[in-house]
Amino acid sequence: MAYVDHAFSISDEDDFLGGGSRSIENRPPVKEIAFAVALLVFGFISVVAGFFMAVNRVGGDRAHGMFFAILGGIMFLPGFYYTRIAYYAYKGYKGFSFSNIPPV
């Protein structure tokens, strides 16, 4: 079982820090998370389509399919990385925060 640190959770229980003078801003960056998920999905689709193109020699040779698969892998890796950070920050795992996701 993983340790969950609720200091980074996005619950509504702790709306104010201190005596109520400052509010905690821990909202998820929606635009950045949507971009990460899009990279993840389109990267996965491109890898699968690229291997399909390479096996069936779409375009005349295997190079077109492998090139497409490599581009899909380049899209998939950062999409997976930042989607994983967003998921763990949402769940409240220790060491993960929405501030770890860079702005677009």
Image (tube, helix red, strand yellow):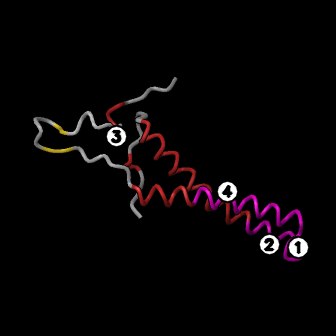
Q: Which residue corresponds to mark 1?
A: 61
Secondary structure under the numbered disc 2 in the rendered image: helix
The residue lying at 80 percent from left, 61 percent from top is 51
Q: Quadrant of residue 53?
A: bottom right
Nearer-the-camera pick, 13 or 50: 13
In the displayed structure, 81 sits above or below 58; it is: above
Which amino acid lies under the numbered mark 2 shown in the image of this protein?
His
The residue lying at 42 percent from left, 60 percent from top is 31
Real-space CA distance between mark 1 and mark 3, rounded to the nearest whole angstrom? 50 Å
Horizontal and vertical percent position of residue 69? 74, 63
Q: Which residue corresponds to mark 4?
A: 44
Q: Is residue 69 left or right of residue 100?
A: right
Do the residues under discs 2 and 3 have CB atoms within 8 angstroms? Answer: no
Do the residues under discs 4 and 1 have CB atoms within 8 angstroms? Answer: no
Q: Which residue corresponds to mark 3?
A: 10
Real-space CA distance between mark 3 and mark 4, rounded to the nearest whole angstrom? 29 Å
* Residue farthest toward the top in the current orientation of the protein: 1
- Does the magenta portion include 65? yes
Q: How many residues crowd mark 3 within 10 Å: few (<14), some (14–19), many (20+)?
A: many
Nearer-the-camera pick, 71 or 37: 37
In the displayed structure, 6 sits above or below 56; it is: above
Real-space CA distance between mark 2 and mark 4, rounded to the nearest whole angstrom? 17 Å
Q: How many residues crowd mark 1 within 10 Å: few (<14), some (14–19), many (20+)?
A: few
Stretch of the chain drawn in magenta: 39-68
Which label was assigned to residue 64? 2
- Does the magenta portion include 32? no
Q: Quadrant of residue 47?
A: bottom right
Do the residues under discs 1 and 2 have CB atoms within 8 angstroms? Answer: yes
* Residue farthest toward the front in the current orientation of the protein: 12
Do the residues under discs 1 and 3 have CB atoms within 8 angstroms? Answer: no
Real-space CA distance between mark 4 and mark 1, rounded to the nearest whole angstrom? 22 Å
